[in-house]
Image (cartoon, rainbow, N blue to C red):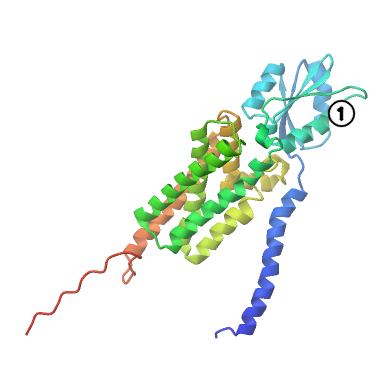
Amino acid sequence: MPTTPTRRMIGVMLLIPLIAAVALAAFAWPAARVAPHDLPVGVAGPASATAPLQRGFERRPDAFDVHRYEDEAAARAAIEERDIYGAVVATDEGPHLLTASAAGPVVAQLLREAVTAQAPAGVRVRVTDVVATPPGDARGGVFGASMLPLSLAGVATGALVSLLALRGVRALGALFGAAALAGLTATALAHSWLDVLAGDWWAEAGVFGLAVLAIGATVAGLSALLGRAGTGVGALLVVLLGNPLSGVSSAPELLPESVGMIGRWLPPGASGSLLRSVAYFDGNAAGTPALTLTVWAALGLTAVLVAARRTAGAPGTPAPPGTPTPARESAPAA
């Protein structure tokens, strides 16, 4: 039974508040619960001197995952390799805090406040930013804001491939071509113009391109398998779930524990982690997020090809737009 205009009007009135509530909860809830959960940090120096520092971190159960290093050089190396977010070095003058604002300005500020609060009265905590953010993005806000446009570009790519009924090789060509051009464009803006990235230009372009490809292929693959509903599912998965759970603006370890773990395996979270590694840490710890994006891209592209083959074998399937219509043979004259 077809719905009446009045019922459709009521449906819209009820649906929009529901969407607003879900979106607000998805974005606001993780931000409202920011706190360390097994955040990897280090202490460096003689065991007798670092024991009080370690006990200070362990006062908050499950908040910090403390690693011990022999000296400052070892702690610096661990930070540069992205094994830890920061470390406290025990010195004769007092605690010396090593941070890495490029790994997350929010984490660097949290560590500064925690170590300062634990220091003896009258002792000044010396702070060194081992891997700092570029001058063009001192607070890391631009980097954090870059993931949503990147996600939207990937969703738009996959949606357009579906909307234009591109199948098979043409769909793959559109996905790869759009991803490559998006990667070059994003790097030109973020690295060359805004000066918020500090790594190898072409490596950063590859990260941006792989991120758009992974997201675009996921949306296109779901659309090919599920139709229009697949486009919506892909957009919700990436934008409404992946972005707020990515931890790009803070850190995955600052989100509620299960949420942070989920966010790392979704394309936005993997993209943010991979871009940090390439842009600020010489590619250290890039393997896992790169593999994650590659798997998403491979699954999406496979779904596109499988759906194209299935559609091609179905009888009565309409030809894609632009396919020439075979000429009819004229009947022989009597």
Q: 54 and 290: which one is in front?
A: 290
Check the picture and name the quadrant holding the C terminus: bottom left
Q: Quadrant of residue 44?
A: top right
Check the picture and name the quadrant holding the N terminus: bottom right
Q: Is residue 248 visible?
A: no
Provide residue 90's location: percent of width, then percent of height. Answer: 80, 18
Number of numbered labels in the structure image: 1
Taking 94 as reference, is 230 left or right?
A: left
Judged from this view, the residue extending furthest toward the right is: 121
Q: Is residue 177 visible?
A: yes
Provide residue 223's location: percent of width, then percent of height. Answer: 47, 61
- The relative height of residue 87 versus residue 105 in the rendered view (above or below) is above
Q: Amino acid at mark 1?
A: Gln
Taking 301 as reference, is 277 left or right?
A: right
Q: Quadrant of residue 233?
A: bottom right
Structural crowding at the residue carrying mark 1, measured as other residues with C-alpha within 10 Å and reported as few (<14), some (14–19) or many (≥20)? some
Residue lying at 35% horizontally and 53% vertically, measured from the top left: 169
The secondary structure type at the circle numbered 1 is: helix
Residue lying at 20% horizontally and 71% vertically, measured from the top left: 327
Judged from this view, the residue extending furthest toward the front is: 193
Provide residue 280's location: percent of width, then percent of height. Answer: 61, 31
Provide residue 77's location: percent of width, then percent of height. Answer: 64, 22
Judged from this view, the residue extending furthest toward the left is: 334
- The relative height of residue 268 versus residue 226 in the rendered view (above or below) is above
Residue lying at 53% horizontally and 55% vertically, measured from the top left: 155
Q: Which residue is mark 1?
A: 118
